[in-house]
Amino acid sequence: MAPSPRTSSRKDANALPSMSSTFWAIMILASLLIAYCSQLAAGTCEIVTLDRDSSQPRRTIARQTARCACKKGQIAGTTRARPACVDARIIKTKQWCEMLPCLEGEGCDLLINKSGWTCTQPGGRIKTTTVS
C-alpha cells in the first residue's frame, strides 16, 4: 500500500515557507545594498574624521583621516586641499608639491626636511602641512 501524502488542515501551513523565503530574500538584498553602498569607487577618497584645534591664538591645528580606494600604482594623498589618490612615486620621493596639494592661486613649497609642504596665499597667509 502506497503512503498517502500528508495534508494539513491548518490554513497557514503553506504560507509560512513563502513568508520565510521572502524574509530571507529581503535580508540578502538589504545586506548586499549596505555592502555595495559602503564601498568606494576605485580612485576616490572620503574624509572619515576631521578635528580642529583653535586653542592657540592665530593658529589652528587640523587633523583629518581619509579613506581611499586607490588604483594600482596610486596611494592616498592630497590634491587641491582634498584627499585624493596620487601617484605612489610622489609619496616615496616626498616631492609633495607634485601632487598639487594647494588651492588654485596658492604657491607650494617643500619644507626643508621634506616632512611636508606650505601653501602660501596671495595675501601672505601660510598654511603648513606635515605628513605623519
Image (tube, rainbow, N blue to C red):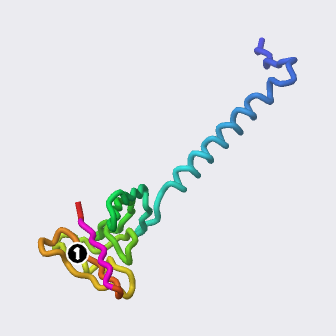
In the rendered image, the vertical position of residue 74 relative to residue 17, given as above or below: below
Q: Quadrant of the C terminus?
A: bottom left
Decide if residue 30 is on the left or right side of residue 52.
right
In the rendered image, the vertical position of residue 95 relative to residue 71, given as above or below: below
Name the dominant secondary structure of the magenta segment: strand
Q: Residue furthest top?
A: 1
The amino acid pointed to by label 1 is: Ile
Whether residue 126 is visible here, answered yes or no, is yes
Q: Report the front residue among 17 and 103.
A: 103
SS for tag 1? helix
Residue 68's image quarter?
bottom left
Q: Residue furthest left?
A: 113
Residue drawn 38% across the image and 78% down it: 80
Q: Report the front residue among 76 and 7.
A: 76
Label 1 sits on residue: 90
Q: Residues within 10 Å of mark 1 (few under 14, many from 20)?
A: some
Residue 59's image quarter?
bottom left
In magenta stretch: residue 53: no
Measuring from the top left, give residue 107's x and y in whole percent: 29, 85
Measuring from the top left, give residue 86's x and y in whole percent: 31, 73
Decide if residue 99 is on the left or right side of residue 41.
left
Residue drawn 70% across the image and 32% down it: 20
What span is in magenta? 124-130
Q: Residue furthest front?
A: 57
Residue drawn 32% across the image and 79% down it: 125
Residue drawn 31% across the image and 69% down it: 77
Decide if residue 92 is on the left or right side of residue 121.
left
Measuring from the top left, give residue 63's x and y in whole percent: 34, 59
In the rendered image, the vertical position of residue 100 relative to residue 58, given as above or below: below
Q: Report the front residue among 37 and 119.
A: 119
Measuring from the top left, give residue 17's x and y in whole percent: 73, 30
Whether residue 65 is visible here, answered yes or no, is no
